[in-house]
Amino acid sequence: MDISKATGAMRKLLKVKYCGAVIVAAGSASRMGGIDKVMAPLKGEPMILHTVRALQNTDAIQEIVVVTRPDLLQAIAGLCKHMDKVTAVVAGGKDRPESVMLGLNALSDKVKLAAIQDGARPLITPQVIDRTVRAANSYGAAAPAIAVKDTIKVTQGGVILSTPDRSTLQAIQTPQIFDFDLLRGALKKARQDGAVITDDCSAVERMGFTVKVVEGDERNLKITTPIDLKIAELLLEEQP
């Protein structure tokens, strides 16, 4: 008997825990050249609506909280009024970890798994969400990733210090999904320690927990610059 196949089959049969999602869209978009990327038009609709709809249409997600800037609360609440999984639209904090925590606090007591999704990833697919939820259901922490194509250099002061082995490098995407109590505890500890964390996986990793990596999607790009917005528009035009 193939033990690895049997184990994989058992994981697929495990009942998936109740999963709530926090969509983080509270940033200042400093690299967008004056474009408000949260509300930027993408195929005729505000970008954030694509992100919310992707989670709304995924069976593995049961409820959604959107975290955004105070000036966008009313506008985004209006966009989400027909999304029955959106239970709250709340104002973010002074940085991303605080915004994530505020989103977690707005989820219901039923949530056992917390999915943290960048609002600026409007092309996330149900397939990536589903396999990440299932991995987190089995391992307690999971994130999608894609292989790094470019050669990465470690630099300092304008010179190259070293070249990591590209075969070991992966670009982590969202949603990053965790046991709810694990993530909340990890974020609180990072805040207490004054630790600088660049994503939610970082908070969990520094607590000594392992994060399972699943297959991501090259189309699941993060809108960071005006060029990214144009690429996303082209990719959406290819979809039926």
Image: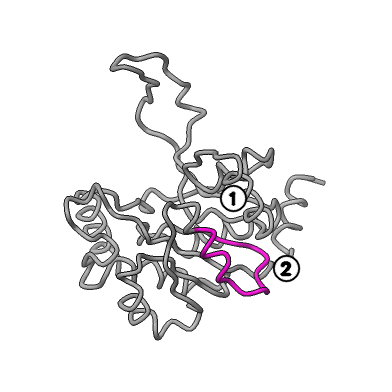
Q: Is residue 79 above or below residue 51?
A: below
Q: Position of residue 217 (x, y in %)?
A: 43, 51
Q: Nearer the viewer, residue 58 or 25?
A: 25
Q: Quadrant of residue 153?
A: top left
Amino acid marked by disc 2: Lys
Amino acid marked by disc 1: Leu
Q: Which residue is farthest right?
A: 1
Q: Secondary structure at mark 2?
A: loop
Q: Secondary structure at mark 1?
A: helix
Q: Which residue is mark 2?
A: 15
Q: Earlier in the sequence, mark 2 or mark 1?
A: 2
Q: Quadrant of residue 132?
A: bottom right
Q: Position of residue 115 (x, y in %)?
A: 55, 61
Here the colouring is: one colour
> On the rendered structure, is 179 left or right of 47?
right
Q: Is residue 104 magenta?
A: yes
Q: Residue at x 71, y 52 (%)?
A: 8
Q: Residue at x 41, y 60 (%)?
A: 124
Q: Position of residue 138 (x, y in %)?
A: 71, 55
Q: Position of residue 93 (x, y in %)?
A: 44, 59
Q: Residue at x 43, y 62 (%)?
A: 92
> On the rendered structure, is 220 left or right of 201?
left
Q: CA distance from mark 2 to mark 1?
A: 27 Å
Q: Is residue 5 magenta?
A: no
Q: Is residue 212 above or below residue 28?
A: above
Q: Which residue is mark 1?
A: 187
What are the residue bounds of the magenta stretch?
100-115
